[in-house]
Image: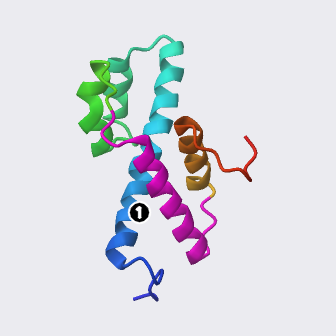
Amino acid sequence: MPPHPSPHIGWIGVGKMVVNTLVGATAPILGEAMLLGTRGGLTAAQMLEVLTQSAVASPRIGYKRGAIEAGDFSPAFTLQEMVKDFALISDAGRQAGVAMFVANPILQHFLRASGVWLADSSP
């Protein structure tokens, strides 16, 4: 087994961060993809039919399918919780020497969306 990832985060915590990274990244990219499809003339039902049967099919998208088709975008997780989790994910990556080239911009996206912006960051 590799060395412990962090003095503050156990193996279960790291596993939770792995899952939360993927769950948290799904929402914004799915939203952008769906908007692109909508602007191209596709319906949510058409896109989700393809997405749930394609190489990118995931239980997460399937789970949200009915709500998305119904136009119900109620959050299951608050933006503040996403900011907290992605800040922890970013910090864990830094501690492990992982650059987090995708997760860090997602954190910035969530920070902008929540109105919280780091003073030393450029918009």
Question: Does 37 sit above or below residue 76?
Answer: above
Q: Give residue 47's position: percent from left, percent from top.
A: 39, 23
Outermost residue toward the top in this view: 41
Residue 75 % position (x, y) = 33, 35
| Disc 1, SS | helix
In this rendering, position of residue 5 left or right of residue 94? left
Q: Residue at x 44, y 56 (%)?
A: 85
Instruction: Report which residue position mark 1 lands on.
Output: 18
Which residues lie in the magenta part? 75-100
Residue 102, position in %: x, y? 59, 53
Decide whether residue 87 is among the magenta residues: yes
Image side of residue 74 versus residue 106, left or right: left
The C terminus lies in which quarter of the figure? Answer: top right
Q: How many marks?
A: 1
Image colouring? rainbow
Dominant secondary structure (helix, strand or loop) of the stretch shown in magenta: helix
Residue under the image location 53 percent in, 14 percent down: 40
Does 39 sit above or below residue 84? above
Does 109 sit above or below residue 119?
A: above
Q: What residue is rendered at 32% in x and 38% in y?
A: 61
Quadrant into which the N terminus falls: bottom left
Of residues 101 and 51, the one drawn nearer to the viewer in this rendering:
101
Q: Residue at x 47, y 30 (%)?
A: 31
**Res 56 → quadrant:** top left
Give x and y (percent) for residue 69.
29, 20
Crowding at mark 1 (Cα within 10 Å: few <14, some 14-19, many 20+): few
Above/below status of 95 relative to 20: below
Whether residue 6 appears in magenta in the rendering, the answer is no
User: What amino acid type should be assigned to the residue bearing mark 1?
Assistant: Val
